[in-house]
Amino acid sequence: MKLTKKLSKVFSKNKSPKKELTVEQKISRRNFIAFGSFLALGSAAYGGWRWLYTSPEEKGGVTAGAHGPLRAVLNTNEKVVRQLYSNNNLVKTYPKEMAAKVVRHNSDIGSEGLIDVDAWKLSVKKNSGEVLNIGIDEIRKLPKTEIIYDFKCVEGWDQISHWGGVKFSDFITHFKLDAETQFEYVGMETPDKEYYVGVDMPSAMHPQTLLAYEVNEKPLPPKHGAPLRLIIPVKYGIKNLKRIGSINFSNTRPPDYWAEQGYDYYAGL
Amino acid sequence: MKVIKEKHPLLMRWTHWVNFPILTIMIWSGLLIYWANDTYTFTLFGVTFIRFFPQGFYDALHIPKRLAEGMAFHFLFMWFFALNGFLYVAYTIISGQWRELVPNKHSFKEAWQVVLHDLHIRKMAPPQNKYNAAQRIAYTAIIVMGFGSLITGLAIYKPVQFNYLAWLCGGYHLARIWHFVLTIGYVLFFLVHVVQVILAGWNNFRSVISGFEVIDEKPQPAIQIQNDETNEKAE
């Protein structure tokens, strides 16, 4: 207390005797402070923006193509959203009549041209090193699940469509892959390895995630991913890999086609 | 004699100005996203008046082929947009400033008179406090719209996790349309707002930075002269 009193005395000595400021002085003083801080903080904000806008791209890894700081934010957002994620949160389903007759087809990277469905095998790489090779008939024998829901593309369009197949979780149970679900991620690739996705395990095990072999109650045509594709309603379309060639499990994020081009790795809905 | 009259509290000034660049970035990054599937038009009776957006508009702003970048920016600045909005609303509630802002029972009738006055059709504007009736409606509407952008935005961002919000917006598809319409609303608001600010002049503009207006108050004479004819005429 004493010290502050002394200090204030010292400072007050340097000041001219206090005079009531005139209105004009008050106005110009307040304007100076307000406009000054407005300009200073405005320039700081602009500098911050330039820093972000010109920030270098992340170094190529599992994800690539985004500004470094923005990638960090996308990953942080995912951590926040995961707090809300629950397998009890279901995508809305619709009556069969509402399903589109002509199902939109956007891209066929990794699933171009025709495929010999009879020769096709799904290879599931177990962590023991064992590889299961499963034909489409074997998968068709499993309990079938159908879903009619609003498919959502990252581009912004959405379409109610009707898919049929086996629940991913039923597939896991049937082929005794429960041990593999302890891993954090599922990776899937097309047979030519041109298109590939990584999906977090909770989303893969979501009750509405299907390994689909039918659209509108007919076998998948090549452009929709014959003979087997992923239908994962808790993700954007980019994760719904067509023409699955192989499935693997890991604790590190599997490579993901669009995450390498600046998109959010998780693409969750 | 010049007198300082306090007008806008510091926090309301700052949230106002902070919102400006944030909303600009949100609209810009929103355009980067919208471009990827630009299907919206304004069509009445089969006649399309506006197609959102013409190619020249996209090219001028370097919009095409930046979807991933747009999403990344949008999902960062959404946090600032929401936080700044909450700060503003919380402050207006706690400080009691909402009383100056929220329309009252006279506002809707008076707002019409304000509009007629501003268009030079009506001579007298209705009496007002800090904001006139039209401002009360506009400034409250813009906050409601901001809240709408937040809700529709969350419904689009995570339509499965926030499926009740998507339901509230009439589904995912409609939520995107609302989100877009609200943005067009901001742009229209901005255009009118800027014209009004220019017309209102420097004193008004300064009050949104410095917080006060300067008014010329006639000094009250120490002795009131009664029955002065010239004085009465001047009144």
Image: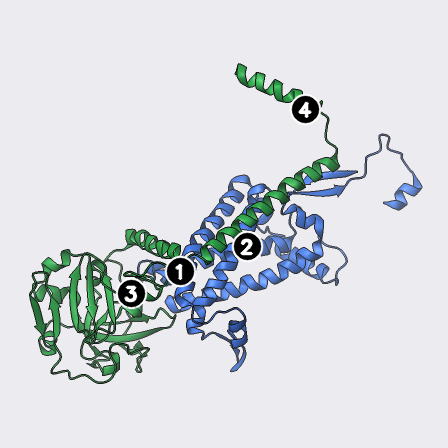
Chain colours: A green, B blue
Q: Looking at this rendering, what residue extends furthest in the top direction?
A: A2
Name which residue lies at 68% across and 49% down.
Answer: B204
Dot 3 falls on which chain? A
Dot 2 corresponds to which residue? Answer: B20
Horizontally, residue B164 falls left or right of residue B74, namely left
Q: Earlier in the sequence, mark 2 or mark 1?
A: 2
**In terms of secondary structure, where does tag 4 sit?**
loop
Residue A86: quarter of image: bottom left
Residue at 24% over, 74% down: A194
The local crowd at label 3, few if under 14, some if 14 to 19, many if 20 or more residues have their Cα within 10 Å, is many
Q: What chain does badge 1 belong to?
A: B
Rounded to the nearest angstrom, the CA distance separating label 3 from label 1 is 17 Å
Q: Nearer the viewer, mark 1 or mark 4?
A: 4
Percent from the top left, x then y, of residue B170? 39, 66
Task: Residue A31: give x, y in percent of width and height.
Answer: 67, 42
Q: Residues within 10 Å of mark 2 (few under 14, many from 20)?
A: some
Say which quarter of the image contains residue A159.
bottom left
Of circles 3 and 1, which is in front? 1
Indicate which disc residue A235 carries: 3
From the viewer's perspective, is the residue at label 2 or at label 1 nearer? 1
Q: Which mark is residue B72?
A: 1
Q: Chain of mark 2?
A: B
Depth check, front residue: A170 or B234: A170
Q: Nearer the viewer, residue B116 or A55?
A: A55
Q: Are marks 1 and 4 on the same chain?
A: no
- Which numbered mark, 4 or 2, is in the foreground of this view? 4
Q: Amino acid at mark 2?
A: Phe
Q: Tell me the residue that label 4 is attached to.
A: A15
Question: Amino acid under label 1?
Answer: Ala
Residue at 77% from the left image edge and 39% from the top image edge: B2
